[in-house]
Image (cartoon, grey):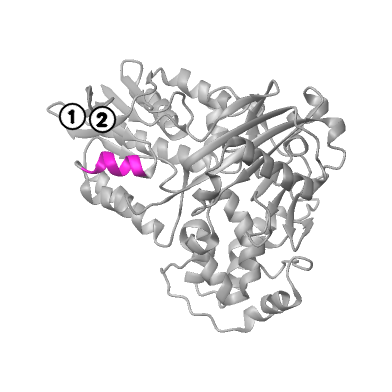
Amino acid sequence: MRVAVIGGGISGLAAAHRLRGLLGPAATITVVERAERLGGVLRTIDLGGVPFDVGAEAFLARPPEVPALLAELDLRDALVHPTAAAPTLRVGGRTRPLPAGTLLGVPTSRARLNGVLSPAGLAAVVAEPDRSLRWVRGGDTALGGLLRERFGDEVADRIADPLLGGVYAGRVDGLGVRATIPALAAALDAGAPSVIAAADSASRGISECESVNSRDRVAPAPMFGALRGGYRMLLDALTSASGARIRLNTTARGLERSASGWRIVLGPSIEPETLEADAVVLAVPAPALRRLLDDVVPAAAAVTGEIELASSVVVAMAYRATDTCTLPLASGVLIAADEPLSIKAATYASAKWGHLAPEATDGMVRLRASLGRFGETTTLQVDDAELVARVRADLATLTGVTAEPVAVHVQRWGGGLPQYAVGHGERVAAIEAAVAAVPGLAVAGSALHGVGVPACVRTAQAAAERVAAWLSEPAR
């Protein structure tokens, strides 16, 4: 059996790995990747000689997909969790602890927002439960619009936007409630009388396991995880275990039916070649997915074309420890939307991760900053030196660190993150339904059910299982 996996990011590699386990050693699995390396938006570099991630930094550790995959690949010992260093928020020209008691920025009744909101903003939060709420069951709306209508602008701009901006590189006004905070939408569907009541309901299970332990309650599992040697450890292990044929620097330009199954058109248009396969998994960003589906599943292609992407930049820097004495004792800082700064967040990696602490490495302090949100592409159209200068100026304001970094890396992610706009779930359902009607074809990736690594692995494994089940049907 021959399976082609188009896309060599985490979704494509996880699909290839699961296909190998399902189809056995005799199957021919080919991974086609247009870039010169595997990994997609996961990338580990050597920053001053130490492995450092400049794409996705961490993953949610409580969903089972990544821990199970690490166990299967014998990488359990590489799993690390954050230190006790806490995140902060830059708002009103001051850096404060990130307020507790919110559901991704949506206030619950336990929220402590003093110092983050103005007196008028606090009053709006207090008054929200007493205001009548209109919510269409099963409907969707922009999260920013909902928050502004219920609480005013400050909750959206100062809390929710920086929290979700780091996940989607988008603004809350363009993100749908149902796709980004599904538990909140479910609570509203169930009849919650206010947004605060809905946030209480949605976060109740989390708050119970996160509360202070009693004698008969075990400590909650860490929420986030990372790999001691960076994501390259996972990418390399998946590649090796899949036994797939890897084709880098190769663009899949077209997909068509053939007598035996599928024909993928590869390479430059002036000298194309073809790859024959019995089944295909498409694990590519939305624009490439739309193009490849255009001729074979036009209905899915049309819907995929509605998913927009955001671009961002990560600037990673290493400093001598003696030059960072003024660095806050925090895991990092999120920047409110109305702050006059260029960066949207900074992670003080050497404080957040024990394996990157100066005493655990080479005595250097490492950190990273991110820039860019959906619709801000022009602000990123400057050279690397200008981006580094902007980051250093903001760090001086935020932390007092003004020294020259010892090592710098600028990583640009053009169109790296899909935007989960209003109606995203309906779009994904339409794509998957249309593709499901086509034998031997499946889709996976961050454009579907989540941009995090666990969600990508989940869609990849589901796609592999769908393809393998079809290939193994007795009728075939």
SS under mark 1: loop
From the viewer's side, name the closer residue of 450 and 284: 284
Q: Where residue 223 sits: x, y (%)?
A: 65, 45
Q: Where residue 254 sits: x, y (%)?
A: 24, 34
Identify residue for label 2.
279
Q: Where residue 37 sits: x, y (%)?
A: 46, 24
From the viewer's side, name the closer residue of 257 and 214: 257
Q: Which residues are magenta?
A: 287-294
Q: Where residue 449 sits: x, y (%)?
A: 44, 48
Q: Amino acid at mark 2?
A: Ala
Q: Visible in this render: residue 219?
A: no
| Callouts 1 and 2 close, C-beta under 8 Å | yes
SS under mark 2: strand
| Of callouts 1 and 2, the N-terminal one | 1
Identify residue for label 1.
261
**Quarter of the figure with residue 275:** top left
Q: Amino acid at mark 1?
A: Gly
Dominant secondary structure, magenta: helix
Kindly identify the residue that appears in the image at 30 percent across and 27 percent down.
4
Kindly identify the residue that appears in the image at 73 percent across and 55 percent down.
89
| Residue 182 horizontal side relative to residue 394, left or right | left
Q: Is residue 207 magenta?
A: no
Q: What distance separates the C-alpha of mark 1 from that of mark 2? A: 7 Å
Report crowding for label 2: few under 14, some 14 to 19, many 20 or more residues within 10 A (C-alpha).
many
| Residue 81 horizontal side relative to residue 364, left or right | left
From the viewer's side, name the closer residue of 15 and 385: 385
